[in-house]
Amino acid sequence: MNVYGLAVSEGEIVSLQDRRDFAATITFDVNNRASIIYTNWPATSVEGVFTDSSDNGQYHRGGGPQRDREH
């Protein structure tokens, strides 16, 4: 599995936001409160982030990841 963009699991950084693409981000704090960052570039602080998932701009449309089925 390839991880692109920022990824945080239980407060531990799994992948850094190191480039402009894959910057649509949803974060959750320890109380499960969500925040959406539509373009996490330049990267914001992960202080207080418990769980995070990032992907390209199509990630959060329609309730789940939108993947290119040809690849």
Image (cartoon, rainbow, N blue to C red):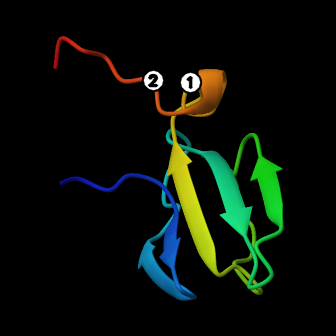
Label 1 sits on a secondary structure element that is: loop
Residue identified by numbered label 1: 58
Vertical placement of residue 14 versus 5, above or below: below
Vertical placement of residue 56 versus 30, above or below: above
Q: Amino acid at mark 1?
A: Gln
Q: Badges 2 and 1: C-beta atoms under 8 Å apart?
A: yes
* Distance from Cα at disc 2 to Cα at disc 1: 6 Å
Q: Amino acid at mark 2?
A: Gln
> Local crowd at mark 2 within 10 Å, few (<14), some, or many (≥20)?
some
Residue drawn 24% across the image and 15% down it: 69
Relative image position of residue 10 (x, y in whole percent): 53, 86
The quadrant holding residue 11 is: bottom right
Q: Is residue 48 in sight in this rendering?
A: yes
Q: Is residue 43 in sight in this rendering?
A: no
Query: Which quadrant of the figure contains the N terminus?
Result: bottom left
Residue identified by numbered label 2: 66
Does label 2 or label 1 sit earlier along the sequence? Answer: 1
Vertical placement of residue 62 versus 18, above or below: above
Residue drawn 69% across the image and 51% down it: 40
**From the viewer's perspective, is 46 left or right of 57?**
right
Vertical placement of residue 10 versus 60, above or below: below
Relative image position of residue 54 (x, y in whole percent): 54, 51
Query: Which quadrant of the figure contains the C terminus?
Result: top left
